[in-house]
Image (cartoon, rainbow, N blue to C red):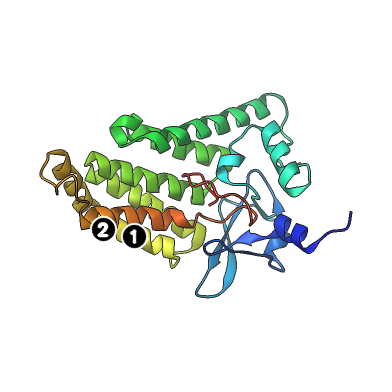
C-alpha cells in the first residue's frame, strides 16, 4: 500500500507544546524501544525538539525513544507488541521484547507492578491513604531497575508525591519529592525547561502549602463553600504541569494524564 502524508505523520510525529505534533528530519527517524535510552522534549524558546540521555549509554549503542506512553509501556510484552503493531505497523523486536523465559517473566512482572502502583497513586487523596511514602519510593526504584533511568516518569511520579505529601501536611516529604521531581525534569528536559523551573518554584512553597492543608483539616481554613485563592492556585499548578505531558510517544495519540503519561 502506498504511504500517505497522514499515515507518515501519524507514525513519525512527535508531540510538542499543547495539542501539537510535528515530523522532524532527524528526531523522527529514531527507532522505538520498550526501554528507551533517550527522552525527547520540545524547547519552545529555541524552536527545537531536543533529545537527552535518560539512562547510561555505552559507546556504540543505538539511541532509541519510545513511541508509547509509560502507561502503555508498562504492559506485559504480548500486549505491548500488539499495541505497537496496531498503532505503528511493525512488530517490536527491541531488547526487552526479545527477552525469553524467566527474564521476560521478571520484566513483565516489574511493569505490571509499576502499573498497579500508578493506579494506587492516582486514587489516593494523601500519603496516608496511599500507604506511606514507601509506595512512591518503590515505584521510583522499579523505574530504575526496569528502564535504567526513566527521568520523565520519575519527575511525574515525584510530582504526584509532592501533592500527596502536601495533602498530608508533611513539609519535609513534600520538599523531598518536589526536589526529586525537579531534578529528574532537569535530566529529562534540561535545567532551563519550563517544567524544571516550575517545579523548583513549587518546592519553595512546600511548607506554606502544608501549613494551609493542616489549617483546613483543623477547620481554620476558608469557608468550605468558598474556594480560596490559594486553593485555586494549587489546582492551577497541578493542571498546568499535567496539561502537557513529557513527550515520548508519537503525536496524534490519545494522552493519558497520569504519572506515567508520555513523558
Task: Give the left or right position of residue 206, taking residue 139 as reference.
Answer: left
Residue under label 1: 200
Residue highlighted by disc 2: 204
Residue at 46% of width from left, 44% of height from top?
259
Is 233 on the left-hand or right-hand side of 53?
A: left
Q: Residue at x 23, y 42 (%)?
A: 170
- Quarter of the image for residue 147 reads top right
Q: Is residue 255 above or below residue 46?
A: above
Q: Residue furthest front?
A: 225
Dot 1 alpha-carbon crowd within 10 angstroms: few under 14, some 14 to 19, many 20 or more: many
The answer to which quarter of the image holds residue 106 is: top right
Compared across the picture, whether 224 is left or right of 188 comes to: left
Answer above or below: position of 141 versus 4.
above
- Residue 60 tag number: none
- Position in image of residue 43 (x %, y %): 52, 69
Residue pushed farthest left? 220
Decide if residue 61 is in sight here.
Answer: no
- Residue 191 point in image, percent of width and height: 43, 64
Q: Where residue 75 sits in the image (x, y, percent)? A: 61, 34
Q: Is residue 50 visible?
A: yes
Q: Please tell me how crowded label 2 is: few (under 14), some (14-19), or many (20+) other residues with Cα within 10 Å.
A: few
**Label 2's element?**
loop
Amino acid at each position: 500500500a502506498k504511504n500517505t502524508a497522514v499515515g507518515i505523520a501519524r507514525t513519525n510525529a512527535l508531540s510538542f507544546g499543547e495539542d501539537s505534533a510535528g515530523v522532524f528530519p532527524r528526531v523522527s527517524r529514531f527507532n522505538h524501544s520498550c526501554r528507551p535510552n533517550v527522552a525527547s522534549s520540545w524547547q519552545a524558546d529555541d524552536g527545537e525538539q531536543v533529545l537527552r540521555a535518560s539512562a547510561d549509554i555505552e559507546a556504540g549503542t543505538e539511541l532509541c525513544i519510545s513511541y508509547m506512553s509509560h502507561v502503555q509501556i508498562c504492559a506485559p510484552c504480548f500486549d505491548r507488541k500488539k499495541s505497537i503493531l496496531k498503532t505503528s505497523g511493525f512488530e517490536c523486536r527491541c531488547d526487552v521484547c526479545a527477552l525469553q523465559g524467566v527474564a521476560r517473566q521478571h520484566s513483565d512482572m516489574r511493569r505490571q507492578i509499576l502499573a498497579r502502583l500508578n493506579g494506587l497513586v492516582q486514587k489516593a487523596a494523601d500519603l496516608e491513604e496511599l500507604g506511606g511514602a514507601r509506595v512512591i519510593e518503590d515505584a521510583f526504584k522499579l523505574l530504575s531497575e526496569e528502564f535504567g533511568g526513566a527521568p520523565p516518569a520519575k519527575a511525574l511520579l515525584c510530582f504526584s508525591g509532592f501533592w500527596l505529601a502536601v495533602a498530608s501536611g508533611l513539609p519535609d516529604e513534600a520538599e523531598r519529592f518536589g526536589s526529586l521531581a525537579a531534578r529528574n525534569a532537569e535530566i529529562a528536559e534540561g535545567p532551563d525547561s519550563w517544567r524544571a523551573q516550575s517545579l523548583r518554584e513549587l518546592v519553595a512553597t512546600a511548607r506554606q502549602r502544608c501549613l494551609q492543608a493542616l489549617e483546613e483539616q483543623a477547620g481554620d481554613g476558608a469557608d468550605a463553600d468558598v474556594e480560596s485563592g490559594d486553593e485555586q492556585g494549587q489546582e492551577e499548578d497541578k493542571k498546568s504541569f499535567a496539561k502537557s505531558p513529557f513527550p515520548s510517544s508519537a503525536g496524534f495519540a490519545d494522552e493519558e494524564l497520569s504519572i506515567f503519561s508520555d513523558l
